[in-house]
Image (tube, coloured by chain):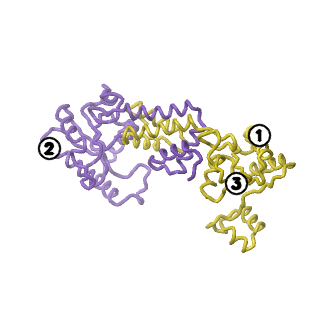
Chain colours: A yellow, B purple
C-alpha cells in the first residue's frame, strides 16, 4: 500500500500490529478515526494509555484491578471459602458474565506447558497453595482448559494440596446447551454419558 | 460483559466504537495491549493522536497530506495535465498501489446523493472545475462507483465543463482478470461485450 501521508502510514502501521488486523482493516480504522472529532480520538487514545499505565494486578487473586485489591476480592458479599482457579483474565470475565458464581478467583496466568517453557515458577501456583492454607478456603473449583496441559496443571495443584483439607472440584464437561449430539466429539460424548445425571438433579441444577 | 477494572472497561468501550469491532474483539485488543511493553502502547496511542491532530488535506487535490500540498501534487515527475477524479482517500491509495498511474488526483469527498443530502456544495466539485480551467488540464479520468449516483456525478461534472476544452474519460468496466464469465452479472457482461477491444489493442494495453 502506498500512502501520500506519513502520519496516516504510521497510524496504519501501528494498528496492523494488533491481533487479527491486516493493513486494509487498519486503514479502515484510521480513516474512521480521521472522520471523528479530535476530542473523541483523544478519549480513545487516553483511555488506552491510562489503561496500560495504571492497571494493576490484584495482590490476592492476580486479576486485573484498579487498586491493590480488586473489586471482586474486596466485595464482602462474596463467598470467601470458594475459589475458582482460571488461566487468565478473560476467563474471569466469562464466568462473571454468567452471574452464577459468587466465590473468589485465582488467576494462574497460564497453564503448565513444559514445551513452551512454562513451569510452576512461571505461574501463580505457589501463591495459590499459600492462599488456600492461610485463608481457610474449603473448595477450589478448577476451570482450566480440558487439554493435557490443563489436566496436568490440575493434577500438579492437587498434589501440592494433598495434605491440606480443601475439596478440589472441576467444572462439568459435556454437551453444550443447544449442541447437537451428532456433532459432538467422541470424548465429550463418552464423558457426558459416563457422568450422566439423574433427571431430578438435572432439573434442579438447570 | 462484567469487568473488575474500570480502566479495562473504558478501554474496551472505546475500542468497540471502531467499525466492525464488537465487545469480544475489543477485549482481545485491550488484553493484547496490556501484554505489550508500556513504550509500545505509547507509540501506538501517539501515532493515532498525532495523525488526528496533524493530518491536513491538500489544497490542490484534497487528498490527506502532511503539508499544505501533498507529496503527489508536489512531485515534479507526475503528469500535471491528467487528473483522476475519485470519491475518497481510499481510492487514491488503491490506484497508487497499482503503480500504473502517473497523473494527479482530485478527491471529491463523496458522490452526489440527494437522498442523503449530498449536493454539489458538499463536494469538491467547484474547486475541480476551477482547477481544470486554471491549470490547463487536458484529461479528467472519472474513477467513481458504477452506480446511479456515480453516473449522475460524472454527468454533472461534464455539464459544468461543457465549455472547457478538457477530455473526460472513465475507467474501463468489464470482467475482472481471473473472473469467470458465468459468475459475472448481466450488466457487466453486456457492457464488456459492447465495449470489446481488438486483440492487438488488448495485448498492447495489458
Considering only order in the chain, which callout, 1 or 3, is on the residue closer to the N terminus? 3
Q: Residue at x 52, y 47 (%)?
A: B26
Q: Secondary structure at mark 1?
A: loop
Residue farthest toward the top in the current orientation of the protein: B76
Placement of A91 over or under B90, stated as above or below: below
The subunit carrying tag 2 is B
Residue B184 position, x and y percent, is 39, 58
Q: CA distance from mark 3 to mark 1?
A: 30 Å
Q: Label 2, on which residue?
A: B162
Q: Secondary structure at mark 2?
A: loop
Q: Residues within 10 Å of mark 3 (few under 14, many from 20)?
A: some
Relative placement, left or right, of B80 versus A37 is left
Quadrant of the frame with the C terminus of chain B: top left
Residue farthest toward the right in the current orientation of the protein: A163
The subunit carrying tag 1 is A
| Viewer-nearest residue: B62 or B193 | B62
Q: CA distance from mark 3 to mark 2?
A: 80 Å
Toward which corner of the image does residue B80 lie, by quadrant? top left
Residue B21 position, x and y percent, is 49, 49
Q: Residue at x 31, y 47 (%)?
A: B172
Q: Which mark is residue A119?
A: 1
The subunit carrying tag 3 is A
Amino acid at each position: 500500500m502506498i500512502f501520500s501521508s506519513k502520519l496516516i502510514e504510521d497510524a496504519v502501521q501501528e494498528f496492523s500490529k494488533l491481533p487479527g488486523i491486516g493493513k486494509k482493516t487498519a486503514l479502515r480504522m484510521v480513516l474512521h478515526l480521521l472522520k471523528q472529532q479530535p476530542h473523541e480520538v483523544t478519549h480513545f487514545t487516553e483511555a488506552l494509555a491510562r489503561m496500560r499505565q495504571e492497571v494493576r494486578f490484584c495482590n490476592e487473586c492476580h486479576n486485573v484491578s484498579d487498586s491493590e485489591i480488586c473489586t471482586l476480592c474486596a466485595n464482602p458479599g462474596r463467598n470467601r471459602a470458594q475459589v475458582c482457579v482460571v488461566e487468565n483474565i478473560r476467563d474471569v470475565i466469562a464466568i462473571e458474565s454468567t452471574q452464577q458464581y459468587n466465590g473468589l478467583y485465582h488467576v494462574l496466568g497460564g497453564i503448565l506447558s513444559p514445551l513452551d517453557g512454562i513451569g510452576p515458577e512461571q505461574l501463580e501456583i505457589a501463591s495459590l497453595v499459600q492462599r488456600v492454607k492461610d485463608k481457610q478456603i474449603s473448595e477450589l473449583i478448577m476451570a482450566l482448559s480440558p487439554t493435557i496441559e490443563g489436566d496436568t496443571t490440575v493434577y500438579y495443584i492437587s498434589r501440592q494440596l494433598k495434605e491440606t483439607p480443601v475439596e478440589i472440584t472441576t467444572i462439568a464437561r459435556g454437551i453444550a446447551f443447544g449442541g447437537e449430539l451428532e456433532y459432538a466429539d467422541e470424548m465429550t460424548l463418552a464423558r457426558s454419558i459416563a457422568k450422566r445425571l439423574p433427571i431430578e438433579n438435572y432439573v434442579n441444577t438447570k
